[in-house]
Image (cartoon, grey):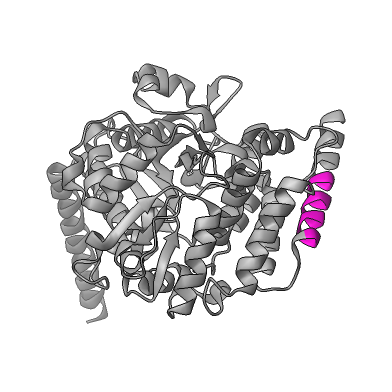
Amino acid sequence: MRRFMSWGWMVLYIIVLIVTVMLITVREEEDPIDEGSPEKITLTFRHFWIKEHDRPILALFEEVVHDYQESHPNVKVNFDGMDQTTHREQKLKSEMVIGTPPDMFVLFGGAEIEPYIRANRLMDLTNFVMDHNLKNQFKDLSLWMANERVYGLPIEGNAEPLYVNAEIFKELGLPMPRTLTQLNEAVLVLKQHGYIPFALGNEERWPAGIFAHYLMDRFSNPDLINMLVQGEEGIGFHNKEYLQAFEQLESWVNEEVFGPSPNKLSTEEAVHLFTHGKAAMYLNGNWDITLFHNEDAPPDFQNKVSVIPFPSVYAEGKQSMAGGYTIGIGLSSNLTDAKKEAALELMQAFYTEEVQTRIVYEGLRIPSMWIKFDSEKTGPIFTQMIAVMEESQTSFVPYDNVLSPEVKRSFLRVIEEIIDGKIKAKEALDQLDASSVQYWSLRKNSIGN
């Protein structure tokens, strides 16, 4: 009996073994191993398109990434978003220090990428640009270049005009302000009639910086900030022109022109005040135009808005526009071989006429490449904004994009403290000078070593 059971188990084992071999053979015949199949690749891509006004841009790039993966089944793209401040000020900086950045990432050109270039953390894209005949297709690559090499590509342009509720101004008999005197007169009238003069949501700190750099530009000239950025001896933030600018900002704070608790207000909350007629003006970038069109805004609101340059000190003074081609995409210098090839192919998919056209029509963003588009299809606010840009004889890069990252942190911090009423104009400039001196001292010592 035991012998029979042993033989029975042996026979059963042989049958299972035969069936298993047959199944493996059949599976191999149905799905043979292709020794020439492409290498499996995973790319990490970090962006900061997570705000309400970024939804159209996010949807567009998600579609481009999806289509790329469909045509490249061996490539998986981990396309993840992160808060802009956290990404730019914390996460990416620490990753660059230890050499572990994402494979691809959205960032700002200019001063922000300078230390990454010096540390050899950004991929040199010069050959990619030349091989695909892209150099002359971009409107401006200057913020993405160093030593005539290209280290990133702008995906869109930006401009920072003043948006005015023309209906409120007409109701109160106010002219569109061309000078700071006219602007200050309008502020008084607006407050008397219960309106918040400026909707400001400074939760992320940089929106108030727009007021600061416009005032600094208007009371001074581009040469001064350029000398500061270059660390020229004897040039400091504490000067007559910048003191006038900061004192003007301080006086607005004392007059409560920004409404209650602007440092605690989000961009979306500030835009709500503007679109619903509680605030008469809004100073920010063109990227917020989408918020004037969304479901929260009154249907006819976009027809009430006038887009104008930030006023000058004098009637005949300059009204240059803050803006540039600062937002773009960079690649890690760690990428090699197949992974590098995959990343560059994805970059090629981003920088096409079709994508740039959709950036205009769907995202209401300024294209970074030379393309044609019908401004009548973008709505009246975007059309006005483009016209103001074209009429502006000069432009300047927003100061938080030209200042070194260390000085920029001090710049945004002291502006935040002025808005909160914690420090005065003079003290703020002293702190900026101290930060600048410390930065250039460390910079010169590191170069000397």
Left or right placement of residue 195 versus residue 170 in this view: right
Query: Quadrant where the N terminus lies?
Result: bottom left
Choose between 185 and 141: the one closer to the eye.
Answer: 185
In this rendering, is residue 418 above or below 39? below
Q: What is the residue that sits farthest to the front in this orientation?
A: 173
In this rendering, is residue 116 above or below 56? above
Residue 67 percent across, percent down from the top left: 22, 44
Secondary structure mostly seen in the magenta stretch: helix
Q: Residue at left 31%, top 40%?
A: 387
Q: Residue at left 42%, top 44%?
A: 158
Q: Is residue 293 in view? A: no
Left or right placement of residue 164 versus residue 377 in this view: right
Which stretch appears magenta?
426-438
Choose between 147 and 192: the one closer to the eye.
Answer: 192
Q: Residue at left 39%, top 55%?
A: 176
Q: Residue at left 26%, top 80%?
A: 2
The total of numbered circles placed on residues is: 0
Left or right placement of residue 423 versus residue 299 in this view: right
Choose between 33 and 390: the one closer to the eye.
Answer: 390
| Magenta span includes 145 | no
Residue 18 percent across, percent down from the top left: 18, 56
Residue 379 percent across, percent down from the top left: 21, 52
Left or right placement of residue 318 versus residue 308 in this view: right
In this rendering, is residue 399 above or below 84? above
Q: Is residue 109 in view? A: yes
Residue 445 percent across, percent down from the top left: 87, 36
| Magenta span includes 428 | yes
